Amino acid sequence: MIVPIRLENSQVVTYNIHIDTLPSLTFDTTVAIVTNPTIATLHLKKLLTKINAPKVEVITIPDGEAYKTLQTVETILNQLFEYRLDRKSLLIAFGGGVIGDMTGFTASIYQRGIDFIQIPTTLLSQVDASVGGKTGVNNAYGKNLIGAFYQPKAVYIDTEFLKTLPKREFAAGVAEIIKMAVMFDSGFFEFLQTANFDDPIVLKEMIRKSVELKAWVVNQDEKESGIRAVLNYGHTFGHVIEKETQYNTYLHGEAVAIGMVVANTLAVELGYLTPFEAKSITSLLERAMLPVDYKIKNIDDFYEDFYLDKKVAKGSIKFILPHTIGAYHIAKGIDEEIVKKSLRMFGSEQK
Amino acid sequence: MIVPIRLENSQVVTYNIHIDTLPSLTFDTTVAIVTNPTIATLHLKKLLTKINAPKVEVITIPDGEAYKTLQTVETILNQLFEYRLDRKSLLIAFGGGVIGDMTGFTASIYQRGIDFIQIPTTLLSQVDASVGGKTGVNNAYGKNLIGAFYQPKAVYIDTEFLKTLPKREFAAGVAEIIKMAVMFDSGFFEFLQTANFDDPIVLKEMIRKSVELKAWVVNQDEKESGIRAVLNYGHTFGHVIEKETQYNTYLHGEAVAIGMVVANTLAVELGYLTPFEAKSITSLLERAMLPVDYKIKNIDDFYEDFYLDKKVAKGSIKFILPHTIGAYHIAKGIDEEIVKKSLRMFGSEQK
């Protein structure tokens, strides 16, 4: 006896990313802002003047990737229950990627899902976390290993918040922008080679272009079975670097920048990229004040760590590599020895 | 500057519920069975003979509602990471509702979502948890307050497992079946008034009818904005009873049975149900060996506890009441005093 079940309520998701001065926002429900002490000190006052709602609560959680844990999510959940948020209430993620990822994940599991909006305050989260609905936390086994795909109702990007952003964090955001250019758009790459990153007009354009490219990618593949994996260029290596350095040495975007250089070494080895192209990517990363060097302590350990990275399916490792600048190649089944040779070459190029 | 985002990948979900002797199941990925010691002792051997997969892991978690927590979910997650399950791996929920809810929730957040199937071994989980995709855990603030909507890939219902089910648990499952009949189908209610619950053929028919009714409801309203709330008949009161008794006195279905009788008292008070109809529902519950009495210690406390129940949106309480047998009424904005009067009446009817 078989009872076939067909649920027809799954819906197309639409929302807007507003790239402009933060407008006034009016809600008819309880709003809980999730933020960290740094952003609260710098910008909470401004945000509160923009929000009109019957009740506004503020939840402050410790700053930094180290606190992106299930435990912190539970702390936020408990606060929401204390404030008696209901299923119609709204969360606002006000901060960088850590805040965005955790607030989105919390929203996805609070009473089986409530609405949230993103007001990202770092360049990285503005270009990266605004699109794609990836939410989650880290654990002892690696980064972002627990989470959900959950979309915000809207995203508000105001470059004004970037004025207080430390230079390293700004550069970490540029890394993701460069990643998009290398993978998808050689014209955008050329634009970045001479762009003045401090010019607000240029900056808004860079954000717009990145966000549109990412939306184009995610639109084709919401669940990461195909092209979306390309967004992981630099990330597979970057994650291992972050893990090896206990998440306390490099910002995510910095680790990704190094990861891109490692990936490029493999791409050159496999003939997908010329040494000249690899060099011009490294130069652009350096122009953006990003690190491009890393000392791999033990090649075998480094390689072994891939297996626990969540991008690994059925034991086979996918490498996302540039195939000339502005195009990509997803390399599968690369021989272990070739990868290790590239890792050694990358190491020997280090000053 | 607005970048509109449109994600077109959300899909219609389809799966089958098989109501038959458990067939052989073949998978080409790692499979992790989540179960509890009771079910493992009684039925794991049988299940293992039916599963063909390259690798089969078994995760045993403590039995009972008290362990349906975020902490247990984290324990399961850690096991999955230890066993190196990847995004293509599969979870099997093998047990009752607690196992199903936690396994489904774990599947929904492990690496942002992997597949799971349900093999429910209690009548309650066979009729109730098979359809609807509600997964989650309890916390200090109440039941099922943390979770996700996440659908299984398939459900296998084998009434053979019910032979080892304690009589009280069997009755608790019948409570949910009676609930469906009272809300949606007077013919089904009449069938139940004389049905022999021990006859396997009758039992399969009861399960099929319940599952189909629930699928019909969920199909109309996957996200519980409307008719799905009707499935909470008896639950709003039942949850409070479970909470007041620290989840250690009544089985869920037993609390729901009492909750239905409380709801009926209110329905009679409001004129939606005749005293005779209320009596015949109580009689059917008693025929199924279900409790229908409960001593409310403090009417005000009992009433206050509604507010924290997750069904409360924006402070207004919805009551799901029978409107004759076989139809429902969703009552909103019922005066506090009328509700409290019904609670007192229910109390005074107690032996």
Image (cartoon, coloured by chain):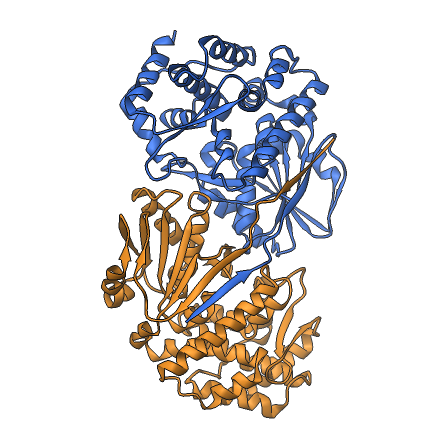
Chain colours: A orange, B blue
**Does residue A240 appear anywhere in the picture?**
no
Quarter of the image for the C terminus of chain B: give it.
top left
> In the shown orientation, is residue B333 left or right of residue B82?
left
Considering depth in this image, is B247 or A280 the residue closer to the camera?
Answer: A280
Q: Nearer the viewer, residue A160 or B309?
A: A160
Q: Position of residue A216 (x, y in %)?
A: 56, 69
Q: Residue at x 45, y 63 (%)?
A: A16
Residue shown at 30% from the left, 43% from the top: A82
Q: Position of residue A249 (x, y in %)?
A: 40, 74
Q: Note whether B95 is above or below B337 in the view shown.
A: below
- Residue B224 visible somewhere in the drawing: yes
Seen from the viewer's position, the closer of residues B297 and A88 is: A88
- Marks counted in the figure total 0
Left or right of residue A204, residue B197 in this image? right
User: Furthest-bottom residue in view?
Assistant: A276
Picture layout, residue A57 above or below residue B61 = below
Q: Report x, y in % for residue B103.
A: 56, 42
In this rendered view, identify the residue nearer to me: A217 or B76: A217
Q: Where does residue A128 sit, x and y in percent of width and height?
A: 47, 69
- Vertical side of A349 occupied by A309: above or below: above
The N terminus of chain B appears in which quarter of the rendering? bottom left
Q: Quadrant of residue A84?
A: top left
Q: Which picture quadrant has residue A312? A: bottom right
Q: Is residue A79 left or right of residue B210?
A: left
Determine whether, in the image, residue B53 is placed left or right of residue A85. right
